[in-house]
Amino acid sequence: MATLGTRRGRIYIDFRYKGVRYREQTDVLDNAANRRKAEQLLKRMEAEMTLGTFDYLNYFPDGRSAAKFAAQQQRRAEKRSAPYAFEKFADIWFAEKEVEWRQSYRDVTRLTLDRYIIPYFKHKRLDEIDKALILKFRAYLAEQPGHKSETLSASRVNHILIPLRMILIEAADRYDFKNPWVNIKRLRETKPKVDPFTLREVQSILETVRADFRTYYTVRFFAGLRSSEIDGLQWQFVDFDRRQILVRQALVQGKLVDTKTDGSSREVDMCSQVYDCLQALYEQTANTSGFVFATREGTPLHNRNVTQRVWYPLLRHLDLTSRRPYQTRHTAATLWLAAGENPEWIARQMGHSNTKMLFEVYSRYVPNLTRKDGSAFERLLKAELNHPRATTDKE
């Protein structure tokens, strides 16, 4: 609240603004007429402070705090003239954030910015981008050609929008304009295509595959590793004493990088088949390469090369439905579920943070593998309702 005072017969104004006290001396004599004018001035000042429009320099251009307020105004002006061009700020944002990310995520984000986001918003100011333009961009993405389909999938579109959302939220906070990303929902995604192999098909594959790749596919089918994880697996991360595979790195675009997420860094328990075949392979090749699965030169396997020269020809030879090698990971999950393993243990084996994906994606395959399609419930009812005690209770 502002008040009036008198010093040496002249009026001064005492007020607080943003937690700071100010006492501004005037040259106005203290009399009844001047006090009425000063009181009107105070009311106007207090109203502007309440509305957030108060400007100290409008009232006290030669005041003791004039230099400080002028500096604040200069900073606000510089802030308003900051890099509002979308392209420029997108590069600034990326440079600030990339230190937080794994190399693989940095590469994907940079590619997303350069291929989709920056070309579309290149000539826009940040404060010109509104909700309508974002939705228009989303519709544009949905019409772009995909890698393996006619158009980009809903999942890919959602992933492209993530950096755009982060950029606009940061810019709105930094440059004090309204965040346009309001109530923009993700596109509905289809569930991952899961087409696991049956145990009999797995057995047929392992019996038929080239001997030098039998261990490789045994680990793929029974340990549930991702392609990049098995290709980057090194002997130093195979713990035979504890019968565990320590997933610590992955081979991405020919480079060893940290695992996909913190949850992906895990310990995978080896079943007897995996343990035995890895131990036999270790005795044969441990001194030739640090990688568990390597070429004759000791370098990591090239996943695409193995897929085209070994995997697909093998499926055609066995007259099995063509499926990506990643289905070996899905197969491991469904076999564990079919065997009745604890879902939390399975989630840890797979590198999932919880069991949600197991129940949403994999569990529907269990009845086909175990024939547990309600028959257990039928047996329970038959045993209990036909029990002599049940008949006695009814009587």
Image (spheres, rainbow, N blue to C red):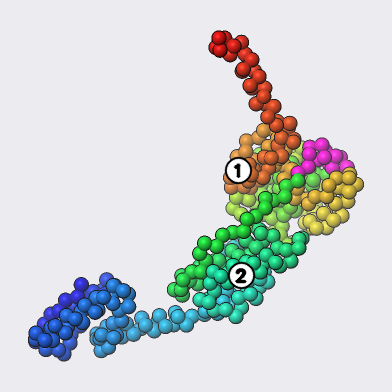
Q: Residue at x 53, y 77 (%)?
A: 128
- CA gap between label 2 and label 1 equals 36 Å
Q: Which mark is residue 136?
A: 2
Examine the image and state in which quarter residue 136 appears. bottom right
Amino acid marked by disc 2: Lys
**Is 228 or 30 nearer to us in this picture?**
30
Q: Residue 309 at x, y = what percent? A: 87, 55
* Magenta-span inclusion, residue 152: no
**Is 229 or 340 nearer to us in this picture?**
340
Q: Residue at x 54, y 74 (%)?
A: 129
Q: Residue at x 40, y 81 (%)?
A: 75
**309 horizontally vs 97: left or right:** right
Which residues are the magenta region? Answer: 196-211
Task: Please tell me whether the stretch drawn in magenta is mainly helix, strand or loop.
Answer: helix
**Is 171 or 279 nearer to us in this picture?**
171
**Is 283 or 128 nearer to us in this picture?**
128
Q: Residue at x 88, y 51 (%)?
A: 313
Q: Which mark is residue 355?
A: 1
Q: Residue 111 at x, y = what percent? A: 67, 69
Tell me the crowding category of disc 1: few under 14, some 14 to 19, or many 20 or more residues within 10 angstroms, Cα based: some
Q: Is residue 293 visible?
A: no
Q: Is residue 176 above or below residue 329?
A: below
